[in-house]
Amino acid sequence: MKKIISLAIALCLMLTVCSTGLMSLTAAAAQTIEGSEVTWSFDNITKTLTFGGSGDIPDYDTYKDEDGSPTMPWAGIDYTNVVFGDGITGIGSYVFYKNYTLENLTVPATITKIGKGAFFECKGLRSITVEGGITKVEEQTFSTCSSLETVNLPETVTEIGAKAFYKCSALKTVALPDSVKTIGDSAFHSCILLEAFEAPASLEKIADRAFYCCENLKTLTLGEKITEIGISAFDGCEKLEAVSFPSSVRTISEAAFSGCSKLASVEFADGITTIGDQAFYLCTSLKSVNIPHTVETIGKKAFGYGKSGAKIDGFSITGYDETAAQSYATENEFTFNSLGKYFPKSGTIGETLTWTISDDGVLTFTGTGTIGDSTADAIPEYMLGNPKSIVLCEGITAVGAYAFLSDCKEISVPKSVTSIGEKAFGYTVDGDGNVVKVEDFTVTGYEGSDAERYATENEFTLNKIQLDLGFKLGEEAKICAFDEENKVITVYDKEASLEKILADFVVGKDLTVEPLEKVTNGATLVTKNGEEEVASYTIIVIGDVNGDGNINSADALLILQHSVEAVTLSGSGLAAANVDGNDLINSADALAVLQISVDNKTPTDYYPNTDNPGEGENPGEGENPGEGENPGEGENPGEGENPGESENPGEGENPGEGENPGESETPDTPSDEENA
């Protein structure tokens, strides 16, 4: 009985499907696409088209038959969802051609290819997100998707193909990833609701008709890498009001902005070379343009023309004399506002030398290297601005012959210049082409330099500069003492650096100090003027007796050994051992070194102060010993006694070993806290 009932139910289901004429495919009924390992199936209940198996969904380049009907096996099925299995790696050409029911789609990152026309005329598609993998949006991929409003593309995309978004008439904004370098022909042609476009950071080319007839495009922002705007790229963008071209743009092609009737502001940057025929034709709101000196070609009716080729009233061009801007204005009888003859404001010579000329005519060279020879017939680029004065900064080593032929009256030459060529400066070219001397020319240069020689030989006024080679201790020095006569710098800082040392000194502007890897006792500090050595100084680091750059027990041991004549210190080692400054090298200095090593004391506690020798030291727990008092115990050793010189502290005993010298004896060997 149960078997009969089951058969009856199955028969009813089959009759239902047949009577409605619907196709219901399940996973069990998945079919393999011919010539591939990809399967497809359709769930009529969820309206889901599923692709399984592995590999690319094949291309359907012959996507319609003789009657114009789609040829894909799933053509005519009203699917609203599409699912891609993990093994699917690509979507072939025209796979979803003319589907009207699919509204939203996410393409997983496992798919690395979407073929041309894949979503051609999917008029119901509103949004699509491509999660990653693809590098190009192919030709016609979303062409005539008239409901498409949102597109999210991954950072892997570098190219938007021809007609990729052609006639996507619902598209209002486009946010392309910064990886995109090229926008192809007619890519956004007739996207009539598109209101703004900001170019990706890497975009280099906008091809022909890319935004043709985007009649609501009002805002356009171009990136710093774009070099070319194609033919009719923005032709017919009626609401576009302003455009600013970056310095990277070289070519604006024919009719690129033709018909942009509300375009009132156009800004060009130096670098553009070509403006094509009718590039801004019919831009009737554009009343004036400023053309850079770099523009070499301006095509026919590029600016200043309206309907039927009539000239725009009052149109004017601003530019430099003897450039394409002046030629175009003259040929078309437009007003020309002259900026004078062009001259560059900056440039380079070689890889290390740069020059600039200020608005007040000061030509300045910075960097390192040489300024080469010139001739009376070839004016260097840096002289086109006819400078009033010339400044050469330190680092320039030579000035070639005829380098600065001009009417300027003065030049400043650094000490680094060791070679000046014939008539390098102070000469000009007269109306007959002769090189003549400039009257009242002044050379500012250093005494004994090549500048002085040149000024003397050419009988120019020399404004002589005395070298500033001063090197002296500053009034607010904190860690250094300076013996200028003996060329010794004493440092009271166990972590001293060259920077800290130089902070204590006033260094002349013509003086440089050679770098030191590490400040150690006995190191040599060298000062120079250019390549010439001016002076060298021995560095004494108080407490760093062995010169290893550290102050520790090893230094204290050397002091004790010296005090009992087990070793003999000399030179910088002996000077570094004299921590307390009393010229007696003994256990008190060793104790001071140990205290410094464990941070109970710092070398600056022993820093000398000529105004108050006692200041900075600790004479017995903060007490003032007064005249004749014993700084160790506060006792008076007796009238006329001189503690530390004439008395014998305890029958030949060594006070440095901690013995008690008796009531009338002098105190123990001065400690680190005593005043020598």
Image: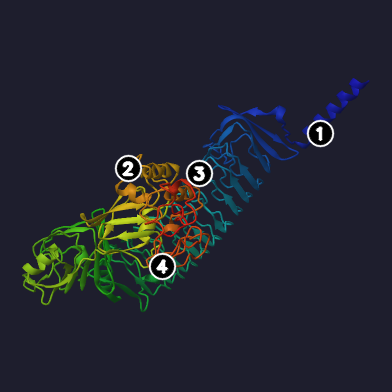
Which is closer to the viewer, label 1 or label 4? 4
Residue type indicated by callout 3: Thr
User: Circle 2 is placed at which residue position?
Assistant: 568
Q: Report the Cα–Cα distance between label 3 and label 4.
A: 74 Å
Does label 2 or label 4 sit earlier along the sequence?
A: 2
Q: Which residue is mark 3?
A: 156
Marks 1 and 3, the one that precedes in the sequence: 1
Closer to us: mark 1 or mark 3?
Answer: 3
Above or below residue 398? Residue 442 is below
The kind of residue on which mark 1 rests is: Thr
Circle 2: element type? loop
Q: Nearer the viewer, residue 363 or 460?
A: 460
Q: x, y (%) of residue 62?
A: 52, 37
Give the CA distance from mark 1 to mark 2: 117 Å
Instruction: Say which element carries label 4.
Output: loop
**Cα distance in 3D space between marks 1 and 4:** 115 Å
Rendered position, 318 above or below 450? below
Quadrant where the C terminus is found in the figure: bottom left
Question: In front: mark 3 or mark 2?
Answer: 2
Q: Earlier in the sequence, mark 1 or mark 2?
A: 1
The amino acid marked with disc number 2 is Thr
Q: Work out whether mark 1 precedes mark 4 in sequence or the reverse, and give the earlier one.
A: 1
Callout in the foreground (3, 4): 4
